[in-house]
Image (cartoon, helix red, strand yellow):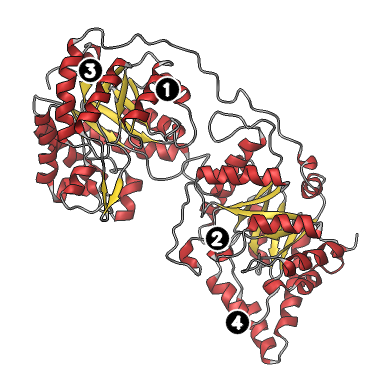
Amino acid sequence: MTGDFLSRLKDPAAILFDGAMGTMLYQRGFYLNSCFDELNVSAPDVVRKIHQDYIRAGAEVIETNTFGANRNKLTPHGFGDRVAEFCEASCRLAREAAGEDAFVAGAISPLGAQIEPWGPMSLQEARDTFREQAEVLRDGGVDLFILETFGNLGEMQQAILAVSDCSDLPIVAQMTVDSQGNSLYGATPELFGSQLDQWGAHVVGINCSVGPRDALDVIERVAAVTDKPLSVQPNAGVPRDVDGRNIYLVSPEYLAEYTRRFVRAGAKIVGGCCGTTPDHTRVQRSTLRLVNADSSACAERVRVEVQEHNEHEQPEVPLAERSHLGARLAAGEFVTTVELSPPKGHDPAKLVKRARKLKEAGVDAVNVPDGPRATARMSAMAAALLIEQQAGIEAILHYTCRDRNLIGMQSDLLGASALGLRNLLLLTGDPPKLGDYPDATAVFDIDSIGLNHMARRLNHGLDLGPGHIGSPTSFCFGVGVDPGAVDLEYELGRFRHKLEAGAQFATTQPVFDVSILERFLERVGDVDIPIIAGVWPLLSFRNAEFMNNEVPGAHVPEDILDRMYQADAKGGGREEGLLIAREIFERVRPNVQGVQVSAPGGRVKLALEVFGSALDR
């Protein structure tokens, strides 16, 4: 199109973007699990035709078919090394379709990975990944960039920085929101609208997730905090499953009516996202002809000040005041814990009885795993509460990301605090395919790094977004670590991310090769955090083989396997396993601040024998 997009933004008339690309490809028979970006190469005529249909319908801007064309999203499809190829092809197809009739926007989406502080991908790595895609789109001749469907405000910042690093083309930055108007990580429209403005976006807006009505509510709130042009591209409502297909029920006429309202609320750019088609664009175009002719269409926007999201941040409760475990850790004292799995049924009697024996023996706390190896057992939170209430000993609740989304995790942690549970071991969780129900669905909105960040915010009186929860929680929370990880550098990197997210202690996987733990401790010698070593008393040679081959993070060296094999042959496997566990306990004790002993099959007596005289205080 003749002219540049920045000049077009200064024109008082609203600008119409195209609608969904994925919806149109889906309608043409391409499965949702296909790599739509690859179709730029394998089905170019289909992609070009969709662009042309939107332009004929009246779209002034079309987006490249590159929503998922970043290295991280392409890698699972086996196309990680084809970023340049797919983006170049998409730019060529869009430019051929646009000619002099439309602008071409280079589409960039989230990376499909959790970035710090929510996950292991560093900010720099995210920025570099965005930049790789942006440079190809720039060289392909796009007129502007559109960063869309971002749920994480921090990730959006890295995308804006990456594009700004390599180009001075205009940036349209669009967050995606829930039905309450907040981003998927809890940022309010007032917060993300203000931040996108400050970070240099030329246009601030929202797209996807919600239908026109909710989108209007959000854009009115964004309009109050920024003078930048606004954009809004809602879905055609919430999809409904009809005979196995996602059907969007919002009609073109309904979207067109809301398009009028978007412009009156201050939107400069309108369009559509999932479920919208050239039919929607055509009716929007007709509406905009009337709206653009009415100079009074755009309401005057009132700017308000946004409070910083940490206004309500409160100091943490001192570690020593959070729990008995926290007090011992803060004092540098050696702690003893035993792991007891929740029952597979609903009767807690045996669990409580075993926990009482541990309290009587002087153990500091009981570890309660959360669906270990992805098995279905009594709720770990319920089991932990029963242990504390009926056995009188503190529990360390293992809490995983596997089964809950962000909202559910925050709700659970708030509930745990209300119930008086203070000690947490925050873990990503074993995937369902490892367990008894391989067809179960995992969630994994975040991993353990993000979960630690969440617990830290709650300990400062803050929720997921900028809001506050009243008085802060007082969790003593730790993380898991695998000293014998195959990729130790990766494990060390994740461990440091967990510490930066606020973890107050770390518990290792079961230690069978003490030299591995010693090497790990040398590598993290500068880390000032209590390390609790895991010890597992082997029951038999078969148990040793299982731990070595089927339990992630457990490495049983050959000499121990040989000892267990020979002992089993003489009928003394359990005694030999106990002897080995006690040897490991004595060797690791001087170098760690605690030991967690597992009680396989609920064998509390066996676990207590591992401690020996360590419980005599």
Which amino acid, mark 3?
Ala
- The nearer-to-camera label among 3 and 2 is 3
Q: Determine whether, in the image, residue 360 is placed left or right of residue 210.
A: right
Image quarter of residue 137: top left
Determine which residue is flagged by label 3: 14
- The nearer-to-camera label among 4 and 3 is 3
- C-beta proximity under 8 Å, tags 4 and 2: no
Q: Earlier in the sequence, mark 4 or mark 1?
A: 1
- Report x, y in % for residue 363: 81, 61
Q: CA distance from mark 3 to mark 2?
A: 55 Å
Which amino acid, mark 1?
Gly
Q: CA distance from mark 1 to mark 2?
A: 42 Å
| Mark 2 neighbour density, 10 Å: few (under 14) some (14–19) many (20 or more) | some
Residue 542: numbered disc: 4
Q: Earlier in the sequence, mark 1 or mark 2?
A: 1
- Report x, y in % for residue 26: 21, 48
Is 391 placed above or below 573 here?
above
Q: Residue at x 42, y 20 (%)?
A: 221
Q: CA distance from mark 4 to mark 2?
A: 23 Å
Determine which residue is flagged by label 2: 485
Image quarter of residue 307: top right
Is 14 placed above or below 445 here?
above
| Mark 4 neighbour density, 10 Å: few (under 14) some (14–19) many (20 or more) | some
Q: CA distance from mark 3 to mark 1?
A: 19 Å
